Image: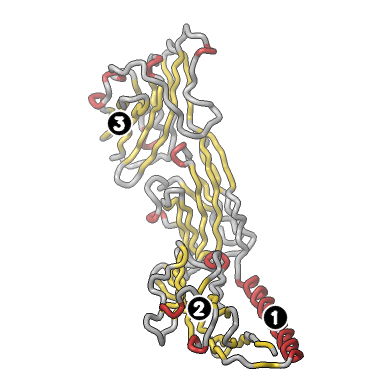
């Protein structure tokens, strides 16, 4: 004599029926979603109970503080449920009292979506002959294979091909005109998709929706510096062109494509490495230029600050405000030794000319251009070598091939 455990699945008016005999080790309540939205919360509930929560899971894991005590220690979901889209619930040691209607819902962006209604019926255990058990087991296996195969074929038709999860790396010098962050797909995208590029700080770098770019949603640091191809949906090329990259742009950029319901269709990450600009001269030259070029035609109320940030203490090397230089704002160490080009807001050339550079001018210089609507920033490492000093004994600010912030030299003029 054997205790028979059967699981029969059927679909009727969008209600999935699951039958199981009491005494079974567990039973699976199926629920699937083709595309999991960002930061979702999945809830399994049974409205006839109080509290009604059977199992809850979000991006941080299981949240069972409101779980009905009758189900304590008896429910679980796949650890990768929110990645794989398999939101099925495993109920261990089902009893007759567990019979009823179970609902699977998902909530994201404040919107709740009902994914599945599963009617569970836990029956009193029966005894069947061995040959009947074998026959039913074969039928069950065949049914499961058909269901799994059908689900696979269906998902393969409605899913866009997910791009590789490997982060692609792009490395450039800070003086290039532009850099392209690649993101391509071989699948034609729907016309109503939303494409969002973000950086590692979760700033919106570029937003595209319904055939239009949305510059008003950009972070001010990227306004006027990004571009995507026209008719980008036809070739499936979502690559982003970033103009005048600086060391402040380095980091991981993420391209995310959403459908109109806010579900993620695909995502790709690109790591951008921008080498810090380094300038090296010998003491005694007439002047040296600290380069900084960005987009032109900037607002007339934009302010430009050149500051030597390291070594400490910080010093204002040059300031441009209200259409003219502001020498009274300079540190006396740089008075009458700096110069910037004319029409700098129109041309976008904010390079600084430093006259008669000295060894004590060595350090980390930062230029910031900003007003209420725009912001630009660049770092330049200046090293001025002593003319009589042996080249082999000269300490470099940093390895020229590195793309991270340097350790500055000790200021030779801390008293200034």
Q: Left or right of 151: which side holds 221? A: left
Q: Residue at x 59, y 79 (%)?
A: 25
Q: Is residue 152 above or below residue 22?
A: above
Q: Residue at x 47, y 79 (%)?
A: 114
Q: Residue at x 41, y 67 (%)?
A: 109
Q: Is residue 413 above or below residue 310?
A: above
Residue 308, image x, y percentages: 35, 26
Q: How crowded is the residue under tag 2: few (<14 C-alpha within 10 Å), some, or many (20+)?
A: some
The answer for how far apart the CA atoms under marks 2 and 3 are is 59 Å
Q: Secondary structure at mark 1?
A: helix
Q: Please give the residue where the numbered disc 3 appears in the rendered image.
A: 320
The answer for how far apart the CA atoms under marks 1 and 3 are is 72 Å
Q: Please give the residue where the numbered disc 1 appears in the rendered image.
A: 146
Residue 292, image x, y percentages: 43, 32
Which image quadrant for residue 344?
A: top left
The answer for how far apart the CA atoms under marks 2 and 1 are is 21 Å
Residue 175 in view of the camera: no
């Amino acid at each position: 004599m054997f205790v028979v455990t059967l699981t029969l699945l059927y679909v009727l008016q969008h209600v999935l029926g699951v039958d199981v005999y009491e005494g079974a080790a567990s039973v699976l309540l199926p629920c699937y979603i083709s595309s999991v939205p960002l930061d979702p919360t999945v809830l399994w509930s049974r409205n006839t109970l109080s509290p009604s929560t059977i199992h809850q899971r979000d991006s941080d894991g299981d949240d069972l503080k409101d779980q009905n005590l009758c189900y304590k220690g008896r429910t679980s979901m796949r650890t990768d449920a929110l990645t794989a889209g398999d939101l099925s619930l495993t109920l261990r040691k089902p009893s007759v009292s567990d019979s009823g209607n179970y609902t699977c819902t998902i909530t994201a962006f404040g919107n709740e979506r009902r994914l599945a209604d599963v009617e569970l019926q836990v029956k009193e255990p029966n005894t069947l002959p061995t040959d009947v058990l074998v026959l039913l087991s074969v039928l069950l296996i065949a049914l499961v294979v058909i269901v799994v195969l059908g689900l696979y074929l269906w998902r393969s038709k409605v899913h866009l091909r997910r791009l590789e999860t490997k982060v692609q790396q792009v490395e450039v010098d800070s003086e290039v005109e532009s850099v392209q962050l690649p993101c391509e797909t071989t699948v034609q995208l729907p016309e109503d998709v939303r494409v969002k590029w973000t950086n590692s700080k979760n700033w919106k770098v570029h937003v595209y929706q319904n055939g239009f770019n949305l510059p008003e949603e950009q972070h001010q640091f990227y306004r006027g510096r990004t571009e995507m191809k026209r008719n980008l949906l036809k070739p499936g090329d979502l690559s982003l062109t970033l103009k005048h990259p600086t060391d402040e742009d380095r980091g991981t950029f993420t391209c995310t494509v959403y459908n109109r319901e806010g579900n993620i269709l695909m995502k790709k990450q690109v790591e951008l490495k921008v080498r810090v600009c380094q300038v090296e001269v010998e003491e005694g030259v007439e002047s040296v230029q600290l380069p900084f070029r960005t987009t032109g035609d900037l607002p007339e109320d934009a302010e430009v600050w050149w500051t030597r940030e390291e070594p400490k203490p910080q010093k204002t090397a040059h300031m441009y405000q209200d259409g003219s230089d502001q020498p009274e704002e300079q540190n006396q160490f740089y008075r009458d030794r700096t110069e910037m080009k004319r029409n700098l807001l129109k041309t976008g050339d904010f390079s600084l000319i430093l006259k008669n550079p000295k060894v004590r001018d060595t350090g980390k210089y930062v230029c910031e251009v900003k007003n209420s609507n725009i912001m630009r920033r660049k770092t330049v490492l200046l090293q001025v070598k002593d003319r009589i000093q042996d080249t082999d004994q000269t300490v470099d600010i940093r390895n020229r091939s590195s793309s991270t912030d340097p350790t500055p030299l000790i200021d030779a003029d801390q008293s200034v």
